Image (cartoon, rainbow, N blue to C red):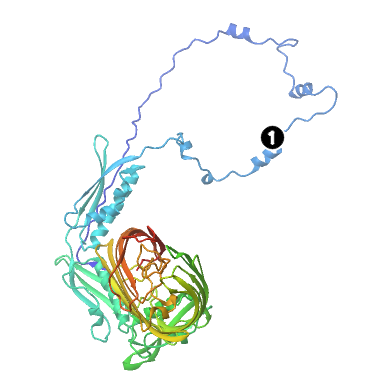
Amino acid sequence: MIRRQAHHVRHMLGLLIATASPLPLMAQTATPPAAEAPILPDDQFEARLPKVEGSDPAAPLPSIDSWIDQQMPQSGATAELPPAIEPAQEQELAQPLPSLDSVTVPANVAADTDPNTQTPDIRYATRIEGFGKTGLEDEFRDASALIDGDGRAETAAMVQARAQEDEKLAVRLFYSEGYYDATALASLDQTGDGTLTAIVSVTPGRRYRLGDIVVTAGATVPPGLARDSLPLKSGDHIVAATVEGAEANIALRLPEQGYAFAKVGERDILLDPATVTGDYTLPVDTGPRGAFRKITTSGDKQAFGADHMEVIRRYKPGEIYDSRKVDDLRKALVATGLFSSVAVDPVRTNEAGPDGTEYVDLHVEQEAGPPRTLAGELGYGTGQGFRAEGTWTHRNLFPPEGALIAGVVAGTQEQGVSGTFRRSNAGRRDKTFQAGALINHQKYDAYEAFTAGLNISWARQSTPIFQKRWTYSYGAEILLSNEQTTIDPVTAQNKRLTYFIGALPVQVGYDRSNDLLNPTKGFRASVRVSPEASLQGNVSPYVRGTFDLTGYYPVSDSLVIAARTRLGTISGVSRDDVAPSRRIYAGGGGSVRGYGYQELGPKDANNDPVGGRSVNEFAVEGRYRFGNYGAVAFVDAGQVYNSAIPKFSDMRYGVGIGGRFYTNFGPFRADIAMPINRQPGESKFALYIGIGQAF
């Protein structure tokens, strides 16, 4: 509320007044008419009368009854005259007349005009005066009704209405920036040649500043919390947006410091024209300082109870209330994907808490959503062919958050089925337990494998809602794999062997990028180590390890430079003692583009890859985005070696371009690349299609 002291604002409006003068009345006097000659003389008039034959002209006329009798039929039968009005018409005439208000006449009929004739538009010009250096003219023009009309209107009254709206708009804009003495005048001017001009003339007046600032609130911890949360200073201009934002900051900060039920009252600004200042007063009801206690829940259809919500929360009972932790709980509940709607609100208990606080409960109103989902993924890569993967998930088959996932892979070179049990938030927030089984068949140039496996793991991973800085996973897996193996690369002699493999993989990741699916700045790093043992006649223990690092640098709002490197090794065993499906390969859409899947590295006599024990890969990509579309150019490099340590020699390079279509769930990607210094048997180009960036 803003009050004025001894201050009045004149609000002047332009008026259009139409006047009409009545026609003058002429006085008249009566004049006796002059004698006129007859049109037809009497003798001629008598001669023209019809003669009456057979009767005496002086005799009286017969009665009407005798005349009627003469008109009747002579047969003696009676005849009835037809009714003068038909019965249906008589009933219609007997109905009461409709009210006059219900009768409408089309405008063109009332005006006796052609309905197809269009009234020509009125053209007008707009002139704006007086904004000066206030900096508000552009904002006024953006919202102006006169300017929005593009200089055309159906009638002059419409132009006048737009001018009056702009008059009010100008005053509102000035008031919002502290010009409380501002006036505006809108008028129409028509020159002798008929040109109509709408003129909006403004006078900003003086701009007011904040005088004394007073926040009336109860005692807080720390003292003066309400005033300190109001970022306003005496001497600042009174800008509506700034004042409202400062008050919103109080409503945000107090609940973060324990005051869950704080309410900001209605402001009062007392203007003083003598000093051109406004004294500002704001009442704040802080309410009691609260501490967390317990969670309650309700809803007609519940996904899980309050006991599991206690596992998900990040605060401890007895801690000072913090609205940020309430928001975090709400987001965590949404991230489960089990609710169609969920709301978390503080509830007063009027029960004393620690350190002079009052206990606050959180009430969760929930409505469970559909627990089953279908998902699919489709991609294509040269050397890997088409690959489609579909999953069916029941996210809450084993409450709370116990999901059953069935998956199927169908592709030109890979087929398989899998089943997985997953428990999210298992015992603690963000911890996921997973156990699964799979049967899979892969047939590539490097190997063909029929594999059955069991796996178990515990993990902390990022989600689209919660992108975590630190992630990890650890677990165990057992694989039984029958594979076709090249036992002599020189002769390309193959043999089918069965491997029994056990592994204990561990992975740690660190993510400082700004987006999970489409990062534009920051970096990511991850290390994976997997001690393994292969039983194929003898037990052959070894360690697989990989290190990945990616970085993203925004050159501008539309251009991002992305870079990637990968180093990998297998130590402790010779290559031939490692199952072909567990060796290291490079080439393809997620590796070195321009080459087929697993195409780089040592090859046999048939020019088929046999895999290696180490790898190094590098890539740099320029990503340019325009709207929902994008273009990329990239250079990839890499090589696979027989040695356990990458040699960084004999590097192979691929260059290419790609297109991106950005959707709300990530970019759709299509890349085409060609190898540099192409070798015999290598494709001239390679095509990769998928969802998400290459890295």
Residue 446 falls left or right of residue 243: right
Residue 589 in percent (x, y) is at 38, 65
Question: Looking at the picture, which amino acid does disc 1 mark?
Answer: Ile
Residue extending farthest front: 491
Q: Secondary structure at mark 1?
A: loop
Residue 275 falls left or right of residue 400: left
Residue 326 falls left or right of residue 620: right
Quadrant where the image shows the N terminus? bottom left
Could you tell me if residue 370 is visible in this image? no
Q: Which residue is more in the foreground, 112 or 142?
A: 142
Residue extending farthest left: 275
Q: Which residue is mark 1?
A: 85
Q: Relative to 85, is 421 above or below?
A: below
Q: Which residue is more in the foreground, 232 or 659?
A: 659
Q: Relative to 78, is 553 above or below?
A: below
Quadrant where the image shows the C terminus? bottom left
Residue extending farthest right: 76
Residue 67 falls left or right of residue 602: right
At 49% from the left and 75% from the top, the residue drawn is 495
Residue 153 in percent (x, y) is at 34, 43
Q: Quadrant of residue 693 in the image?
A: bottom left
Residue 52 in percent (x, y) is at 71, 11
